[in-house]
Image (tube, rainbow, N blue to C red):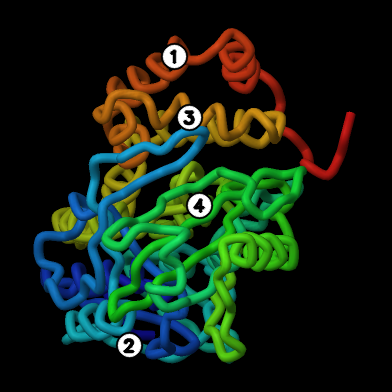
Amino acid sequence: MERMDVLVVGAGPAGMALAGACRRVGLTTGLLDPAPQRPWLATYGMWSRELPADLPASVVAARAAGRAIAVTEHDLGWEYAVLDVPALHSHLSDRLTGVDVRVGRAVGSPERGVVALADGSRIRASVVVDAAGRWRPLAATEKRGIPAEQTAYGLVLDEGAVASLVDAGAALFMDWRADHGESGWPTFLYAIPLGGGRVLVEETSLARRPGLPLSTLRRRLHARLERRGVSIPKDVRDEKVSFPVDDLRHDGKGVLGFGAAAPLIHPATGYSLAASFRLAPQVADAIAANLPDPGRALAAAHRTVWSPSAKAIHRFRRIGLEALLSMPPDEVPGFFETFFALPERHRWTYLTARDDVGGTASAMNCLYWASNWGLRRHLVASAVRRPLRSNDVTA
């Protein structure tokens, strides 16, 4: 069985980015996926300051000023970039020159450096990477309770039709106003330009255990649009989103988790793509610098993705997630009102930094002192209480 330097399982954006980066530093690299060239259906975006320097301008479909509405409206001070997904796929595919792209479904890693496929075959590599998103086929079996999920239901509409929802040239990061007319679990409107005169409007549940049903989100979005006088064409394209935001760190023995599988997902936003793009060349360099010793190479890659700082910040973010999950629904908009009123440096650090422990702690400290006493007690309690088992269970 031929042995390659790196095998990346999963041909999503994170997996493609890492496979290409490994090949560019001279590593013999494989990329395994059941359908490597399948179209990507999700919409991807990130703050413009996070765009990779080598990403072609043609991959950015639209740019817009970031806004948020909690109780009042806030200018975030950052530009939001929405990616042209087919162009992104083409760009990352072009950077796979020299990568051995294989069609197959990974079902496990029976021993270090070996990936078993559904057809009974095996592939051997010095370093194995699981970049297969939420499915994480190479992770150890976890006994866990109900996952916390971000769910969303969206429609792609003409820019002119949604002028009452979002201003031209703006990206509405969150709008917590209950224009849908329902009480209960809080959801927000997310509205971003896609380029070409199109806008994606989504009703979003930031996090819930279990995820809020898509049928509820669809109903709320339709009600919100109806109240604003927005008609919905019969042939409208929709988008459905559902993914966990509380996965534990990847625990596959002898395997590196990468991308959403790591997980690099920020539980307060659901974003992971910018972190994946930033880390891909760093991980490739770490592997290349430590081969031909597979153990050292894998350990170096792990330290790159999960430095002590990154582990600490991951823990901070999980505390914040549990605080949100256990917060009374009617207090959620007020919490975000406090957050969006923080100084820009604190908001930016909390939402984007993975290695600035001091900055993240400072941001959380600032949020604490800016909060009322009720919210302060809730934030402190969330750091010490056991995770909420389910939002469907009432005490």
Residue at position x 41%, y 43% from top?
68
Report the front residue among 322 and 63.
63
Q: Amino acid at mark 2?
A: Val
> Label 3, on which residue?
337
As drawn, the label of residue 250 is 4
Query: Could you tell me the amino acid type at mark 1?
Result: Ala
- Look at the numbered discs 2 and 1 and tell me whether their residues touch, using CB distance below 8 Å: no
| Percent position of residue 130, x then y | 44, 65
Spot occupied by residue 164 in the image (x, y as percentages of width and height): 46, 60
Gap in angstroms between the C-alphas marked 3 and 4:
34 Å
Q: Secondary structure at mark 1?
A: helix
Residue sitting nearer the eye, 176 or 252: 176
Check whether the beta carbons of the residues at disc 3 and disc 4 lie within 8 A of each other. Answer: no
Residue identified by numbered label 2: 101
**Which mark's residue is nearer the viewer, 2 or 1?**
1
Corner quadrant of residue 168: bottom left
Label 3 or label 2, whichever comes before in sequence order: 2
Q: Nearer the viewer, mark 3 or mark 2?
A: 3
Q: Which mark is residue 370?
A: 1
Disc 3 residue type? Glu
